[in-house]
Image (tube, rainbow, N blue to C red):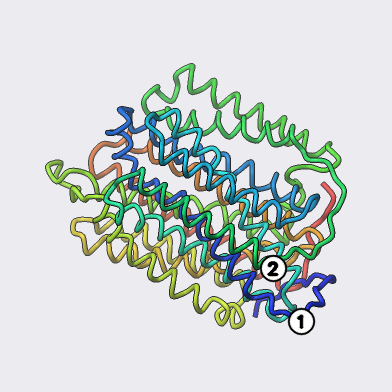
Amino acid sequence: MATVVASAARTTSTKSPWPGVVALAFAASIAALQNTAVVPLLPVLQRELHASLSAVSWTLTLSLLVAAVATPLLSRFGDMYGRRPMILGALALLVVGSVMAALATSLTWLMVARVLQGAVAALVPLSIGVARDVLPREQLATGIGVISATMGFGSGGGMILAGLASGDFHLVFWITGGISLVAAVIVAILVRDTAPAVKGRPDLAGAALLAAWLVALLLGISEGGSWGWTSPGVLGLFAAAAVLAALWVAVERRVAEPLVEMGMLVHRGTIGATVASMLLGFSFFTLMTGTSSFAQVPVETGYGFGASTLQVGFFLLPSTLFMLVISLFAGRIMRRFHASSMVAAGSAVTGLAGLWLVVAHSSPAHLYVATSLMGIGLGVGYAALGTMAVEHVDPAKTALAAGVNALVRIVGGSTAGAAIAAILAAHQGVGGYQWVFGAAALAGITAAIFAAVYGRLNRRMVTAPSAR
């Protein structure tokens, strides 16, 4: 059974905390939904906004980049000013960004909207922090599992939403804005933050450097195929990313209150969750984006299915259904198995989905098998990631640890888009997609190995360091 260090401070209210936890789980699912809904819309955006596919792909990558920076930053603000105000603020940005995206008539305007939407990724660690403060010790693993599992369900739901909207990106963003507003109202009514605020100073320099080296790295990866991997531009971007990353690490080690505690990234108690989360995020977005793109390739090419966005939604429906079912039973599963074992099993099944598509991709039935495996793997893995990330962390560092874990997962996901663009530029035809699915399989299997190995090492309670 998974073991979680419980917070010493618990609410003394006789009211059940579960309505608030369910409200947070609903909000977390929308945070995931707003990203994945864009994936099947990329060809539509390319056509309607008169832009190249590599350009419109940044509507996804840019949102993930913002999420990578906003997640640890807003988690820190949550410790300083209260998690509930930060959750409501992130939802407000999502509503505003969704309305802007729904009204967008140019790629520039849409990208600005996606920047605002990206901040909502911080909901997951903030929600886990609230759950840890309000839930009894024996219900904590269940609460974190529910929040994490519904995040996976929301990811699949975004693809379905895009399909049901028949590729109308304006409608997709109107719907996203509407349900985000509903979520904000429900959270405002049901969620209470009992943790006392702590004094501190936000690490703005660390946030700026993190954004800078990620942009340089992802731009270099995404343009390597078209510019040439040895071109001055690509080599310059990689060099800039390396220098900026080194500077970022130096700043984080010296600043009094860092955006990301370096010790928490590499400590034995958290490194398994860190690496598994990053690789599982990469595998998920690579599989989802690759499957969507492959399904929409015109039949005339000899290897695609010429699917519409609605058909893509149906291809992804099994994954959504499996994530939903698993999220409903996440609590019972978490009480029976170690979190690391669940992450390892889920990652392995996700890797198997990629491996299946490497060898079998000639009929729609093959896609349905792969998306079913993906849904099972992600449902199980995501349900336990949150617990695995914080179970060996000092209670005062819960939100920070969850934020770090969400950060590396988002970095893994944002790398997927750039990697796919590079692979497809280097390998034409069905072979390119086989390389894409192979990369997803390798990431999933490697994540399973890390989760299993470090889970075994951490059977005894280990506390992650608060020092850098």
Q: Residues within 10 Å of mark 2 (few under 14, many from 20)?
A: many
- Front residue of 132 and 218: 132
Q: Quadrant of residue 388?
A: bottom right
Please tell me whether mark 1 sits on a helix, a strand or a loop. loop
Which is nearer the N-term, disc 1 or disc 2?
Answer: 1
Image x and y of residue 81, in percent: 79, 50
Which residue bears the numbered disc 2? 131
Going by the image, does 48 lie left or right of 402? left
Please name the amino acid that badge 2 sits on: Ala
Q: Residue at x 23, y 40 (%)?
A: 429
Q: Quadrant of residue 441?
A: bottom left
Please tell me whether mark 2 sits on a helix, a strand or a loop. helix
Q: Where 234 falls versus 315 (above or below)?
A: above
Please name the amino acid that badge 1 sits on: Thr
Image x and y of residue 86, in percent: 69, 51
Judged by depth in the image, the label closer to the viewer, 1 or 2, is 1
Spatial distance from mark 1 to mark 2, Cα to Cα? 16 Å
Going by the image, does 112 lie left or right of 209? left
Q: Residue at x 78, y 72 (%)?
A: 6
Q: Residue at x 60, y 43 (%)?
A: 68
Going by the image, does 51 lie left or right of 457? left
Task: Report the quarter where the N terminus lies.
Answer: bottom right
